[in-house]
Image (cartoon, coloured by chain):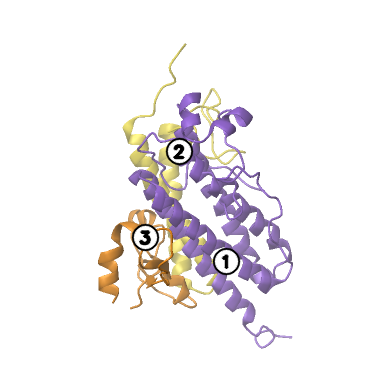
């Protein structure tokens, strides 16, 4: 039986960097839902969304796709099904 | 529709191999004020809530599924390497006999998840219900923190508890938005 | 600045079966006081926000096990 390969240590710190930026987006989303006219928050949301997309691209290049149904590209063979899943790391 | 993202919202680390914690944590998985109940309640209420707060219910409901996944991750990690004997000692013997090591939608006392989640169709009644639900979930996290001896689990639970506070804040703001006189702003 | 933990002392009967636990606490976090969140509130950095569970220090209400800190906090709360 082959042992599944483990993620490198950098996976955890890279993941946390993405989680931090994406959490800011969660907070700003809920905030803007009740403060739709806050222009500063809106600008921050848009610039943070760009930052998140950059981090996501780098993360996916290193560790595989984060989203599916066509929102992430895949190398061959199909990577989406690969372990580890979030509850395993 | 929804898209899955292959990452947790917040890192979950379990520091101590104590399967008994899984029995307590399951309250927030399949309990009356747990994350599943919250997700289903908000996503169900969003259809009949006034348009200006529909988005908020949609988004908080969506975030609750990320919290559900964090709780399941803790339960899974606490039980996956436990022997049947250890599960029995942890008070999970009945769970093991009925469900094996599967995560299951029931509360800490083993009662099956109750699909009777609250939705009245009255915007104020529903939002007050939601505020109360957030406060109840916040207190459940406090009770679990009080009986947990795992600082790493408590770190994740502290995050989840703070999310209840922010959600409660947003629901309170939603009530204020619905109290405003809409007709004054509208151009006919 | 309001405190986020309040205390009360329940009635103790001489016929209570167990020794009294002393003062009882309950939480009154910041969302009970803030009202509609004002624009431009100070923010945490993204990493700090993740660690605190909120983007805004003004919405952060930490929690610790009150059974571990009961006496000390009671004294500071008055």
Hue of chain B? Answer: purple
Q: Is residue B144 above or below residue B170?
A: above
Q: Give the left or right position of residue B137, taking residue B52 as reference.
A: left
Residue at numbered disc 2 = B20
Q: Is residue A64 above or below residue B119?
A: above
> Which quarter of the picture shows residue C3?
bottom left
The residues tagged by marks 1 and 2 sit, at their Cα atoms, a distance apart of: 28 Å
User: Who is closer to the viewer here, B1 or A89?
Assistant: A89
Hue of chain C? Answer: orange
Mark 2 falls on what kind of element? helix
Q: Position of residue B112 (x, y in %)?
A: 66, 44
Mark 3 falls on what kind of element? loop
Chain drawn yellow in the picture: A
Residue A50 visible at all: no
Residue A80's disc is: none
Circles 1 and 2, Cβ within 8 Å, touching? The answer is no
Q: Position of residue B89 (x, y in %)?
A: 46, 31
Look at 39% across and 39% down and name the residue there: B14
Q: Are marks 3 and 1 on the same chain?
A: no
Residue at numbered disc 1 = B132
Look at 58% across and 55% down and name the residue there: B33
Mark 1 falls on what kind of element? helix
Q: Give the left or right position of residue C40, taking residue B91 as reference.
A: left
Residue C19's disc is: 3
Q: Position of residue C60 (x, y in %)?
A: 38, 65
Q: Nearer the viewer, mark 3 or mark 1?
A: 3
Residue B184 visible at all: yes
The chain holding disc 2 is B
User: Who is closer to the viewer here, B23 or B178?
Assistant: B23
> Who comes first in sequence, dot 1 or dot 2?
2
């Amino acid at each position: 039986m082959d042992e599944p390969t483990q993620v490198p240590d950098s996976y955890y710190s890279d993941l946390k960097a993405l989680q931090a930026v994406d959490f800011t987006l969660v907070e700003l989303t809920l905030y803007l839902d009740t403060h739709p006219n806050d222009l500063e928050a809106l600008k921050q949301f848009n610039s943070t969304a760009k930052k998140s997309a950059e981090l996501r691209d780098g993360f996916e290049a290193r560790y595989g796709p984060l989203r599916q149904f066509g929102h992430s590209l895949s190398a061959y063979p199909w990577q989406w099904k690969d372990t580890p899943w979030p509850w395993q790391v | 529709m929804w898209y899955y993202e292959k990452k947790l919202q917040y890192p979950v680390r379990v520091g101590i191999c104590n399967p008994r914690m899984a029995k307590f944590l399951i309250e927030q998985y399949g309990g009356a004020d747990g994350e599943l109940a919250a997700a289903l309640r908000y996503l169900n209420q969003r259809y009949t809530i006034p348009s200006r707060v529909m988005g908020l219910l949609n988004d908080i409901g969506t975030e609750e599924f990320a919290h559900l996944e964090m709780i399941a991750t803790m339960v899974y990690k606490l039980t996956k390497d436990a022997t049947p004997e250890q599960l029995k000692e942890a008070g999970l013997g009945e769970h093991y006999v009925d469900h094996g090591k599967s995560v299951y939608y029931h509360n800490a006392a083993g009662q099956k998840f109750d699909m009777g989640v609250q939705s009245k169709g009255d915007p104020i009644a529903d939002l007050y219900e939601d505020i109360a639900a957030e406060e109840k979930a916040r207190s459940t996290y406090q009770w679990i923190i009080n009986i947990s001896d795992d600082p790493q689990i408590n770190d994740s639970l502290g995050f989840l508890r703070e999310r209840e506070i922010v959600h409660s804040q947003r629901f309170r703001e939603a009530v204020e938005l619905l109290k405003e006189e809409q007709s004054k702003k509208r151009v006919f | 600045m309001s405190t986020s933990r309040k205390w009360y002392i329940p009635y103790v009967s001489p016929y209570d079966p167990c020794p009294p636990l002393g003062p009882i606490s309950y939480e009154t976090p910041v969302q009970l006081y803030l009202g509609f969140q004002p624009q431009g509130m100070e923010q945490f950095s993204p990493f700090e926000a993740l660690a605190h569970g909120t983007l805004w220090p003004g919405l952060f209400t930490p929690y610790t096990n009150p059974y571990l800190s009961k006496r000390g906090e009671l004294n500071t709360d008055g």
